Image (spheres, helix red, strand yellow):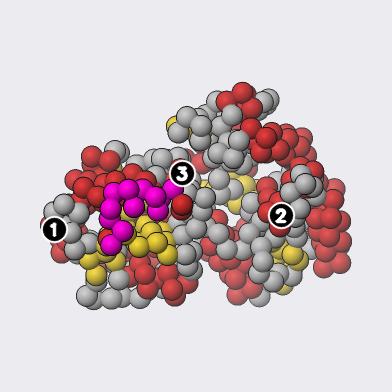
Amino acid sequence: MRILHINHYYHKGGAETVFRSTYEFSKKLGIESYICHSGKEKADLNLENFENVNHFKVIKYIFNLKNFFKLKRFIKEKNINIVHLHSYTAMSPSILLVLRLMKKKIRIIQTVHDYHIVCPNNSLYNFRNNQICEKCLGEKNKEICIKQNCEKRGRLFLLLKYLSNYISYKIRKKDLVDRILVPSNFLKKILIREGFNENQIYVIGNPIDIKEKIIENKKDEIIFFGRLTKEKGIDEIIEVFYEFLKCNDNYILKIIGTGDEKGRLELLVNKLKIQKNVVFKEYLVGEELRKEIAQSKISVMNSIGFETFGLTPLESIMQETIPIVKDIGATKEVLNKIGMQLIFSNIEELSFLLNNVVKNYSNHKEKIEISKLQIKKLNMEYYKKIKEEYLMKGYRC
């Protein structure tokens, strides 16, 4: 058996963590495994993405002919049996056309991490109006997004994304992928509303980094780690932290990650004159990230767009850092499985919980061990389900 894992990036966010973990697990199973992405890191097959080609060649966002021929040739030469597709949009729908043409010879699995197959801007969020938007959901014609002008980079880029989404829809239809894997029931319901067959969708969760780096004497730090994008609500975290400092001026807020909001967030910190209490650090992974999480007492996740899973609180718990999480999308569903209930709905509740955790830190920390055991159980269940998918009887080869 030979599996090709495809994702548009190797390092970026939670989806890439799942991509890397799943690839490594397939190798541990003794399966001949290959990896394909368009990041800077070396892969068995490196493709182009829209960010690393000349932007005058915008057609490559809509259809990248070079990617088409490279992927098709690789699948033939390596005699691939299973393609495990993750996200592909930055590499263009040419990826899907290869799979469509070779469908009779391969089994196709896709892990869906976001809303790219239901929403042209991938997020079910209107960046122009700063609110959740479901107007495209369930609609065959997604051109309403052009009228809404909901993409953060403007109408021209949105037009490109719309055309890419339209071509993807025409190629994949509802029968290209044999099995759709999703991390939560919340996302499964979204796909069903879009018209996908319920029996085709399998809720599998996400793999979690369960390596621990326990630091007994934690620092008075609050941490956010993830993509620095508008839908993550980091500006609200900074504003709440500003008020929090009036009674807790010894605390530091660490913001770890990269993204197009970083400059604006730094300006907000300067405006509030809290530069001494806020530290920005670049995107980290592995041991470096675990260390930053482990030395912090609290982590905060304040997404204002629908989360499909939410790895941040689970990764925090594994380092015995107490997560405070907004109830949006799948976050409550996931946290209920591990017995953590520090959930808020608005910034007033976030402010209350921050102060409450600081005052009652020992009581909250005692609950961590039970949650860690539940996370390890979820992790084992994920890999068991992935193994079943790869070794499913009757796959085409």
Q: For the residue labelled by badge 3, is the local secondary structure a helix, a strand or a loop?
A: helix
Determine the CA span between mark 2 and mark 3.
22 Å
Instruction: Say which residue appears at 55% left-offset and 66% top-offset.
Output: 21
For the residues labelled 1 and 2, the Cα–Cα distance comes to 48 Å
* Lateral position of residue 55 relative to residue 137, left or right: right
143 with respect to 292 (left or right): right
Identify the residue at image location x=35%, y=67%: 293
Q: Are marks 1 and 2 in contact (CB under 8 Å)?
A: no
Q: Is residue 277 above or below residue 167?
A: below
**Around disc 2, counting alpha carbons within 10 Å, would you say few (fewer than 14), some (14 to 19), or many (20 or more)?**
many
For mark 1, what is the residue? Answer: 360
Residue 275 lies in quadrant: bottom left
Q: Mark 3 highlights which residue?
A: 230
Q: Amino acid at mark 1?
A: Asn
Query: Which residue is label 2 attached to?
Result: 49
x 76%, y 44%: residue: 58
Residue 220: % across, % down: 22, 66
Disc 2 residue type (three-letter) = Asn
Cβ–Cβ under 8 Å for marks 3 and 1: no
Determine the main secondary structure of the stretch shown in magenta.
helix
Residue bounds of the magenta highlight: 264-276
Q: Position of residue 198 (x, y in %)?
A: 58, 37
Q: Earlier in the sequence, mark 1 or mark 2?
A: 2
Q: As shown in the figure, which amino acid type bears the numbered disc 3? A: Lys
Residue 273 among magenta residues = yes
